[in-house]
Amino acid sequence: MEMLETSDLHIKDIDARVRSVNLRAKIVGKSNPRYVLSRFGDALTLSTATISDGTGSMRMSLWNAEIDRVSIGDTVQINNGRVRTFRGELQVSLGRKGRLQVVENQATQ
């Protein structure tokens, strides 16, 4: 299976071949933060957001400071987001190279 490099996509176009993605989506849900241990034994805070762009929805992992940067209703631009399968479901996260920008804040709408 050929892996695809970073590209601008809609959620409906993301599949297991996509490594990283640029996309704009709205935060439509967000779980309460919880503490997890990394494989190196570090304590991290994790929240899972549900994002939607009108073509579909998927989950997005938010780690530590990322959690407080977004709220339900915000529109975000994700650049170089890392796509992977977790527990049989495609998810996006920022990883080391990804960037998250709030382009429309729900409080100002």
Image: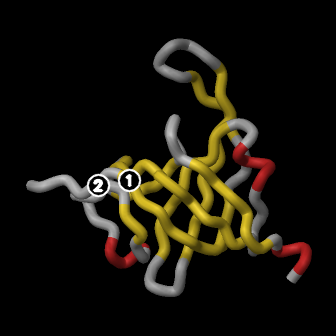
Say if mark 1 contacts mark 2, CB within 8 Å: yes
Colour mode? secondary structure
Residue underneath mark 2: 5
Say above or below: 85 vs 43.
below
Q: x, y percentage for residue 90?
A: 37, 58
Front: mark 1 or 2: 2
Asked if residue 80 lies left or right of residue 16, the reply is right
Q: Amino acid at mark 1?
A: Ser
Kindly identify which numbered label has been placed on residue 20. 1
- Given the current orientation, which residue lies at the most extreme top position? 41
Q: CA distance from mark 1 to mark 2?
A: 6 Å
Q: Earlier in the sequence, mark 1 or mark 2?
A: 2
| Left or right placement of residue 83 versus residue 3 in this view | right
Q: Is residue 107 above or below residue 34?
A: below
Q: Quadrant of the N terminus?
A: bottom left
Q: Residues within 10 Å of mark 2 (few under 14, many from 20)?
A: few
Q: How many circles with numbers are drawn on the protein?
A: 2
Task: Return the residue nearer the eye: 53 or 102.
Answer: 102
**Where is the C terminus found, in terms of image quarters?**
bottom right
Expressed as whole percent of the image width and height from the top left, the position of residue 96 reads: 52, 35
